[in-house]
Amino acid sequence: MTRTRNRHIIILRGLPGTQKSKRARQIQEKYSGSGKIFSTDDYFKENKVDFDPGLLHRAHIWNRKRAFEAIREKERLIIIDNTNVTKWDMWPYVRMAFRRGYWIRFEELPEKPIEYLYRICKGLIPMQSLMGMREKYQHVRNIWDVLYNRDSKRRWMSTTEWQENRW
């Protein structure tokens, strides 16, 4: 007997300014407005604070926790709206979804010139940070590229966050 995966997680990938949030809303509309979008940027909106790089770690933990709760509640469509530049960035989402029977899809947004992204981000993200993200960007072919990435697994499994949640 084969198990069908009728729950989906779509992991959007792209540098800041590539319009991931717009794409997330388009996907949600395609599914008649169902599903949930999880973006680390929402941490700043919901807490009514300006973007602060010093709070990014806390914001990412907050976002992973919300996504994990939706996965445990068996939400049928989940969209992760983050940069997801490296395999390490995606590993927790892929692991928590795979272990709970989700169909996992990556969607890379088209690359755009760094100068364009800098303008779109209104200078909130330094040019050097954008260039660093582009240099670190890791392409993935499938979920196995992420799940079996030894560095990601080793680094995540030593974190308090993973030990508390055991995604």
Image (spheres, helix red, strand yellow):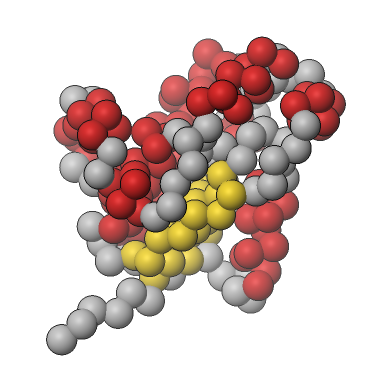
Task: Pick whichever, 82 or 87, lies toward us.
Answer: 87
Measuring 20% from the left and 29% from the top, which residue is drawn there?
154
Q: Quadrant of residue 146?
A: top left
Q: Quadrant of residue 33?
A: bottom right
Q: Is residue 40 visible?
A: no
Task: Pick whichever, 146 or 66, lies toward us.
Answer: 146
Measuring 65% from the left and 29% from the top, which residue is drawn there?
48
Query: Looking at the image, which residue sits at the far bottom?
Result: 1
Q: Quadrant of the N terminus?
A: bottom left
Residue 165, image x and y in percent?
A: 22, 40
Residue 94, image x and y in percent?
A: 35, 50
Q: Is residue 145 left or right of residue 37?
A: left
Against 85, is 147 above or below?
below
Measuring 59% from the left and 49% from the top, which residue is drawn there?
108
Q: Is residue 14 visible?
A: yes
Q: Is residue 17 left or right of residue 139?
A: right
Residue 88, image x and y in percent?
A: 37, 33
Residue 73, image x and y in percent?
A: 33, 62
Q: Is residue 58 left or right of residue 108?
A: left
Against 77, is 41 above or below?
above
Measuring 60% from the left and 27% from the top, which residue is drawn there?
134
Task: Pick whichever, 144 or 25, lies toward us.
Answer: 144
Against 17, is 51 above or below?
above
